[in-house]
Structures are given as structure tokens and as C-alpha cells.
Image (cartoon, helix red, strand yellow):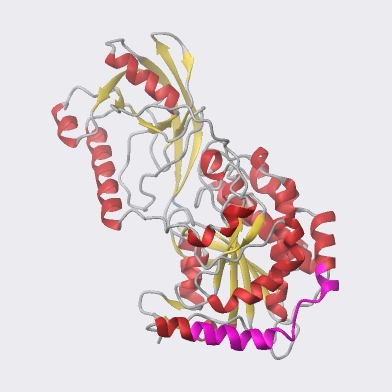
Amino acid sequence: MKKIFLRLSISAITFTGAFAQQTPDPAIIAKIRQEGLERSKVMEHAFYLTDVNGPRLANSPGARRSEQWAVNTLKSWGLQNVNLELWGEFGQGWDIQRCYVAMKAPYYQPLIATPRAWTGSTKGEICSEVVLVKYDTTEIKRLAGKLTGKIVIFDTKDTIATTFKSDATRFTDEELAGIESLPVLKKISPAVTARIKALRARVGELLFEQNAALILTLARGKHGTVFNAASASYEMDAKPTVAELEMSAENYLRIVRLLKAQTKVELEADIRTTFYKEDPKGYNVIAEIPGTDKKFKNEVVMLGAHLDSWHGATGATDNASGCAVMMEAIRIIKALNLNPRRTIRLALWTSEEQGLWGSKGYVAKHYGDAATMKLKPEQKNISAYYNLDNGAGKVRGIYLQNNLAVKPIFQEWLKPFHDLGATAVPNRNTGSTDHISFDAVGIPGFQFIQDKLEYFTRTHHSNQDNYERLNEADLKQAATVIAAFVYNTAQLDQKLPRKPLAGAQ
């Protein structure tokens, strides 16, 4: 570890010495600020991605609409090599055609719920009794013959507590300064995740075998917010499933209380979903501003965000905001005719929500295999990848991804934006999103720090993730800062320094 740190420190000193002679042109930065803050189109991009194209679950009709809209829009700006690039096989698409659910007894009440992704339909309009069941395979087997045509709800001890914290927050200066010292979040182990997934699948199979009419599951969230937590299988040969609804906590817990009080509950529902198997392949949207320097035009600076979303809303903060910002960043550079030395390449990834499939497929195709560390020639020609996928808040800095050598560079690049709140350069990573695919094969990949706003408390994967949750001033600021970072990277006399890469071939 000490040797690695020493190499990083030497690299930082060496590169900083070269960099000191090549600070960003203040006149260019001023133009980027003016275009990004005064003539922004970022909300227009966001409108088309959300309100017009709708939910963008992987390989759904909404996803396909948004992919084609992005291609057409980027071409209209005069970008080059715009295309839908195949990254590999994904699976079947899925969409909601109708979702109606209400309590009919002991009284009528409309209910808030969203079909769980890739689950089936009810057998037409149904009206049935709700049965309270333990989430246990042995218990479900014991009830064989008693669940036919019934609506199943699982027992729970969950409650909703009052909170006195604001949904929306911004980083204070003290919090930004303390990001580097925050403890690393613990991830659920793959083994635990596999067990949870296997149990969920087996419960679903048993209820399908018993001809249950509908399954209700408790959604995370409160105040009517439904977070889409998981999905059934999207594999082409996936087994059929019972229609399943993720229900708001207030509605779900009321039904459980009534049943425990021996009060009969009946629901009426009509859930219709459609599966799409015509094209199981996955595609990324790619577009470029070609480099103009004979020495560097074959080198690339990339920026990107994931285009797909969940289905409970229109995916505004996750991640239409990221796509709108990255599209706006490249539009700014193109509109100003800045003629970058290196090629600037935009990527809008698909199927990120199911496991970074779009960016992983792209990296494997162009740069190398993260499992074997067998690298391709193109891997040497990319300077950096910049990602945006933490909501719709303004940029407050950038995570270094443990690449200490770039710290003085990024600190210098942020100086013109200190007045806009972008100051932090902590040596740490953020959550798993598409920059990880690049970092895994030794390419400098970075995620920007953003104000949280309502991202994790209200909008992330939820039925509240709509256009109204976007803050125009924040998105303008983010696009402006990122446009400068991308352009600065394209203009350097050398590529950004890299971390030592173990096991590369």
C-alpha cells in the first residue's frame, strides 16, 4: 500500500509540474459560463426525456422512444457518429397497460400501488378477498388449495414513524469538508442478495402454482411514496408470474391491521402488463465532437449518464437529470465551436438499473475485460470518463476515485466555479454507477458530487420521480461545470494520470 501511495504521489508531482504551465483559458471558461447559465436548453432536454417519452424501463417502449429521440436530437445539433450502438443481449421488455386497484370492503377507497416490474396481469377485472400470509414457503405450502383466486398480502411488523427532518437537503460547507472522512458504506454481501432473490422467486412460484389472483407487497416509503424495490426476471425464458403490486405503506398497513382485527377486506383490481420479446438486445446512444489536433484527435474524453429508469414515474432525477445535463454539456461545447483537441464522446447508457449492463458492455467491447484484465488497444487512448447519476442537485465537487494524482488538477479546474458552490475534491468514491465500469479496467472514471435535495428521501426509484422534482438553476450549474471539465480534459498536453492497475495484460 505504501508503494502504491508513493507512486501516486510521484505521479501527482510529475503531472502537476506539466499542468501548471497549462491552466484553463479564462476567456473560454467565461464563454462556457455564459452559454450554460444564460442560454441553457437543459430543461427542454429534461421535458422530452420525462413528460414526452415517459418511463424508460430497460427495453420497454418508453426506453426505445427515448433512445431514438436522443439520436435525432444529437444529430440535429451537428454531432458526428451519432448512433445506437449494440452492447449485447439484455432480455425482454415490459410495460404497464392498465393499473387500477381499490378497496371495496369494508368500504370503498382508491389505493396507491405500482405493478412490480416484469410481473404478470390479473385475469381481467377481479374482485376478491384479501388473505394475510406469512412470508414463508412452508406456510404457503400449508395453505395449498386455499389461495386460489385470492389476493395475498404478507404479514409485517413494520410501522411508519413521524420524522422531523426535511426531505430536501443541501451540503453545508462543513459537510463538504467532511466527506473524505465519512465511513465507507457497507454493502449487502452477494450471498445475502442471492438468498433474498431466491426466496422471493420461490414464493412467487408457489403462489403462481396455487393460482393466487394478485400479490401485494409493502413498498418502502411514506406519505404515498412508493419506491420500486426489485423486479421479476427479464430473461427471455423467464417463468410467468402472478400480478404483483408494490403498495404504499399507509394503504398496505391499513389492510394488515383490518385483517388482524378479523375484518374482511375485499379489493377490486385490473392489472394489465405486456412483455416485449421482439428485440432482446441492448443499445447505448453514442455521439461525438471529433478532435481537431492531429496528435490527439484519436484520443477520447467521455461523458455520460444512464438513460433507463424505473417505471413508477418518469425517471426525472434518476436519471433524466443526468442525461439532460450531459447532453447540455456537449451542446455547450458544440454551440461555442470550441474545436477540442481530443474527441469528446457522449454516451447515454441503457439497463444501468439492472446492473450497469450498458456501460459494462461498452467497456468490454472497446476497452477490455474487467474479469481477466485483458485490455484492448483503445484502453490507452481514453483520457477520462465523467458520470452524473446522483439526482438533480447542483455539482458541489468531484470524487477522486482514489486517483490522488488528479487532485491538484481538479482543484484548479473548480476555482472558476467556487462562486457557484463547486469546491470539493475528496479522495473517495460514490455509489455504484457507470463510472465503475471504466475504473474497473484502469480508465480514470469520475462521479460528480451533487446536492442530495430529495433524491434518497423521496424520488430515487419512486412514483414521485417526475419533472417537478427538477431544479432548473441546479441543472444549469451542473451542465456548465461539467462542460468545462470535459473541455479542459480535451485540451491537456497529455492524458489525465492513471492509478496503478494490477493484473493488466
**Position in image of residue 190 (x %, y %):** 30, 57
Q: Is residue 389 visible?
A: yes
Residue 473 sits above or below residue 157 on the image: below
Q: Nearer the viewer, residue 452 or 233?
A: 452
The extreme bottom residue here reads 295
| Nearer to me, 224 or 369 | 224
Q: Is residue 230 left or right of residue 381?
A: left
**Where is residue 214, by image quadrant?**
top left
Q: Main secondary structure of the magenta part?
A: helix
Residue 95 image position (x, y, % from top left):
49, 41
- The boundaries of the magenta stretch are 7-29
Tally the marks. Answer: 0
Residue 72 visible, this angle: no
Q: Residue at x 23, y 29 (%)?
A: 134
Return the residue nearer the eye: 74 or 367: 367
Q: Residue at x 67, y 53 (%)?
A: 394
Question: Is 336 colored magenta in this rendering?
Answer: no
Which residue, as the protein is rendered here, is positioned at the far front?
174
15 in relation to 121, above or below = below
Res 384 → quadrant: bottom right
Rendered-image quadrant of the N terminus? bottom left
- Magenta span has 20? yes
Residue visible at 69% across and 57% down in the picture: 478
- Residue 52's x, y, as percent? 67, 43
Residue 501 image point, x, y percent? 44, 82
Q: Is residue 457 above or below residue 302?
A: above
> In what quadrant of the picture does the C terminus appear?
bottom left
Residue 419, relative to residue 442: is it above or below? Answer: above
* Left or right relative to 324: residue 98: left
